[in-house]
Image (tube, coloured by chain):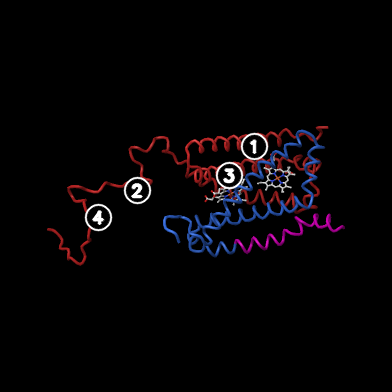
Chain colours: A blue, B red
Amino acid sequence: MPAGTLYRGREGMWSWVAHRVTGVLIFFFLFVHVLDTALVRVSPEDYDKVVATYKTPVVGLLEYGLVAAILFHALNGLRIIAVDYWTKGPRYQKQMFWSVMGLWILLMLGAIYPVLGHAARDLFGS
Amino acid sequence: MATEVSPKDAVELTSSSASYSPDNPAPLIEPPRARTRRTPRSTRTNFELYGWLFMRLSGVVLVVLVIGHLLIQLVLDGGVTKVGFAFVAGRWASPFWQYWDLAMLWLAMLHGGNGLRTIINDYAEQPNTRVWLKTILFTAVAFTIALGSLVIFTFDPNIR
Ligand code: HEM
Ligand code: HEM
């Protein structure tokens, strides 16, 4: 490890980096999301036109990515809270990190069909 | 009575501290977060503590609000294909979902905004850059919260 740095690698640092990156992504998504939702105050036709693009396969993949970011940030956020408040939290932070990753992968597998099913039907018929 | 120090245990002074002696003591170093007479009055609040607490409290509530929202919008009842003006009109006919969305808007924007403030503090080093970035951030958060709240409560299903 190089001297004079707080970046120590391993689970602790990478989960922190990923928490940061996902937090920023979600923030920018939310900003745009409130703008597009505001179209309901302007014109129903324009709102429906914009929302129609959300139903295309490519944007479907982006939505799947957004779900991935939110689920990671939410699960890892709960882990951070547990490390701070649960007396044994710091001792088990690594185990909790790998539990978060396991749960995240399970949920992402479960989300494939509900989130991307309509895109598959668009692309491959029926 | 002076304590005997055997030569084996004595600390040997090296160059940087060798010149200090009882007559020429080393300067006192304040612990990093100690409040001294020079700490500006204006930092004497617990703002950062409340911010830290807020991140955790809002995080717990957001898990329910945001994951519930994603289930409704992307998973249940045909997923994203059902979303449209008529769908929104149906949802915002109920005050329950209006207040759900309002709470999600405020909490997520303040949580994300406070998170970005931390990130600006971490990476922007020039005082000028910091002020500018925080001004832009504050404006974006205030604008989004105001617009989103207005849209929820002035929504008109018969706009056409
Ligand atoms: C889904 C539930 C969520 C939970 C449980 C959660 C939890 C947390 C926690 C505990 C922190 C504090 C980290 C620390 O003090 O070290 C944090 C930071 C952050 N969150 Fe969230 N959060 C959630 C949703 C969101 C949303 C919706 C956004 C965006 C609008 C967001 C953006 C951020 C940002 C930008 C940070 C700062 C990251 C950093 O300083 O590295 N979070 N989150
Ligand atoms: C791609 C996934 C998403 C879809 C399809 C979606 C869809 C919608 C729709 C149709 C509305 C209109 C009102 C309603 O039906 O409740 C809405 C409002 C809202 N959504 Fe989402 N949403 C998504 C993701 C998110 C996420 C991740 C967040 C939070 C970080 C979020 C936060 C909000 C907020 C705050 C409102 C209220 C907007 C306002 O005040 O004008 N949404 N969303």
The subunit carrying tag 2 is B
Mark 1 element type: helix
Label 1, label 4: how far apart the Cα atoms are? 59 Å
Label 4, label 3: how far apart the Cα atoms are? 50 Å
Residue type marked 4: Ser
Q: Residue furthest left?
A: B1
Which of labels 2 and 3 is toward the front? 2
Q: Are marks 4 and 2 in contact (CB under 8 Å)?
A: no
Q: Horizontal placement of A115 versus A93: left or right?
A: right
Q: Which mark is residue B111?
A: 3
Identity of the residue drawn at 77% across and 47% down = A54
Label 2 Cα crowd, 10 Å radius (few <14 / some 14-19 / many 20+): few
Residue A53: x and y, percent? 78, 46
Mark 2 element type: loop
Same-chain check, marks 4 and 2: yes
Q: Horizontal placement of A13 versus B73: left or right?
A: left
| Mark 1 CB lies closer than 8 A to ligand 2 | no
Mark 4 element type: helix
Label 3 Cα crowd, 10 Å radius (few <14 / some 14-19 / many 20+): many
Q: Are marks 3 and 1 in contact (CB under 8 Å)?
A: no
Residue A11: x and y, percent? 53, 61
Q: Is residue B55 above or below residue B130?
A: below
Q: Are marks 1 and 4 in contact (CB under 8 Å)?
A: no
| Mark 3 CB lies closer than 8 A to ligand 1 | yes
Q: Which mark is residue B144?
A: 1
Residue B154 found in image quarter: top right
Q: Horizontal placement of A114 versus B38: left or right?
A: right
Q: Is residue A39 above or below residue A109?
A: above
Q: Which mark is residue B8?
A: none
